[in-house]
Amino acid sequence: MPDVIGEQELMEHERLTLQAIREIDELCDHFEDAWKSNAPVEIDSIMSSYKGSERLTLLRELVATDIYYRWRNGETVDAASYEAQLGPDAAIFDEVIES
């Protein structure tokens, strides 16, 4: 997936500790590897196991990756599918689409 980091993400990354960045990167790599092996995992399964205070950053990265691979596979991507999976956290979908 191409790395496209917007201004908001850069500002947020500046506030993260190196350990948090590494944890998020590792989780995102695992998530992307699952997509590449045609065995995608649900975003909420990763989010439910992550207890860090940087949940919004992780969620944004996972949703962006998920959207990328769904579009790449010809799937329809809409807010409703994320609402069913993420509940109130699904608002991040619009933010990711707009960036």
Image: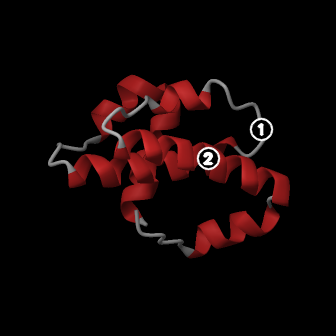
Q: Quadrant of residue 98?
A: bottom left
Residue highlighted by disc 2: 58
- Quadrant (top left, top right, bottom left, bottom right) of the C terminus: bottom left
Amino acid type at mark 1: Gly
Residue highlighted by disc 1: 52
Tell me residue 19's x, y (percent): 83, 53
Amino acid type at mark 2: Leu
Q: Earlier in the sequence, mark 1 or mark 2?
A: 1
> In the rendered view, does 65 fall on the left or right side of 25?
left
> In the rendered view, does 24 fall on the left or right side of 3?
right
Give the residue at x 45% y 37%: 90
Nearer to the camera, 96 or 72: 72
Neighbour tally class for label 1: few under 14, some 14-19, many 20 plus, Cα within 10 Å: few
| Cα distance between the residues tagged 1 and 2 | 9 Å
Q: Is residue 85 above or below residue 66?
A: above
Tell me residue 27's x, y (percent): 61, 43
Q: Secondary structure at mark 1?
A: loop
Q: Quadrant of residue 10?
A: bottom right
Nearer to the camera, 25 or 50: 25
Tell me residue 6's x, y (percent): 53, 73
Is residue 17 something one can see in this rendering?
A: no
Give the residue at x 78% y 51%: 20
> In the rendered view, does 44 fall on the left or right side of 97?
right
